[in-house]
Image: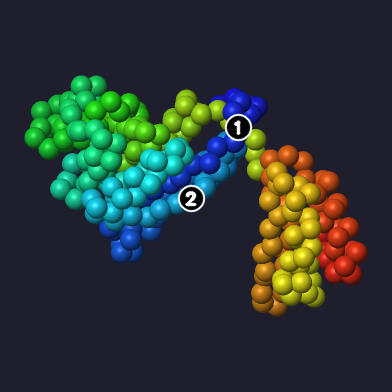
Amino acid sequence: MSATPSTPSLAFGLIVIGDEVLNGERIDAHLPAFRERLAVRGHDLAWYWMLPDDPATLMRQFRVSMAAGDPVFCCGGIGATPDDHTRACAAATAGSTLERHPQAKGLIEAQFGADAYPNRILMADLPAGCSLIPNPINNIPGFELNGHWFLPGFPRMAGPMADWVLDTQYGLGARLQESALEVVGVPESQLIPLMRRLGPRFPDLKLFSLPHMGHDPHILLGWRGRRPLDAAMEALSSELEAEGMAYRRR
């Protein structure tokens, strides 16, 4: 990776597919991992869907995400068993068909030899026109179609494959910064007029409030953005002081 930002910060989607995740048999480990790998590269995880192994649901959601144009990581359902529908649904949604990808076929044959047949080779049946994503764990590739990067459902495989995608296909964006104060002694509703005044003054930043309950109730009030926050934080402090609202610096 380059040490300095080389591209605008991007907003990615994440789709995790699998009945076993929805019904609680497995805990999804993709979400925290993707949030972190995007953040360290200066990009955002903008949305996250958890979907079942159901073709109608997959195609309905793929129609939405492919039309939106966001880059999307999609984990799960690209295997060869009858309950793996992701490859066929992605192809159908994109108006394509499944065909045996010659490079994927060669990789699977090289990895498994005669044991590639008759079943493992089915994972080389990919949407026509897709490109491959290398898999350093077992050489069974993922694929890209319409800005969607389709990866295995196993985090141990999906992780390095996603890293390859990010490091070779996308540059570094600017890291997200955050700064906040702890406002005490007032209900969150009293902060609404102040927030409405401040927000338009810094339109490229996001002003947020987050109440904390318990033995030390307070409201975390601050800014997020990809440029220095000093001026915005000074304005926030001034507004709180003008309103006579007590706050603590973190």
- From this view, report whether residue 102 is shown above or below residue 214: above
Q: Position of residue 27 (x, y in %)?
A: 38, 58
Going by the numbered disc 2, the residue's amino acid type is Trp
Q: Quadrant of the C terminus?
A: bottom right
> Is 114 displayed left or right of 87 in the figure?
left
Seen at 67% across and 77% down, the residue is 214
Residue 66 placement: quadrant? top left
Q: Position of residue 171 (x, y in %)?
A: 55, 28
Going by the numbered disc 1, the residue's amino acid type is Pro
N-terminal of the two: label 2 or label 1? 1
Which residue is under mark 1?
Answer: 8
Seen at 85% across and 63% down, the residue is 240
Q: Position of residue 244 (x, y in %)?
A: 89, 69
Q: Disc count in the image?
A: 2
Q: Position of residue 164 (x, y in %)?
A: 44, 30
Disc 1 crowd rating (10 Å Cα; few below 14, some 14-19, many 20+) is few
Looking at the picture, tell me which residue is in the foreground, 121 or 239. Answer: 239
Residue 108 seen: no
Disc 2 crowd rating (10 Å Cα; few below 14, some 14-19, many 20+) is few
Which residue is under mark 2?
Answer: 47
- From this view, report whether residue 5 is shown above or below residue 224: above
Looking at the picture, tell me which residue is in the foreground, 229 or 111. Answer: 229
> Is 194 displayed left or right of 64 in the figure?
right
Looking at the picture, tell me which residue is in the foreground, 176 or 29. Answer: 176
> Is 185 displayed left or right of 48 in the figure?
right
Kindly state the secondary structure of the residue where label 2 is placed. Answer: strand
Kindly state the secondary structure of the residue where label 1 is placed. Answer: loop
Alpha carbon distance from label 2 to label 1: 18 Å
Seen at 74% across and 75% down, the residue is 187
Residue extending furthest toward the bottom: 215
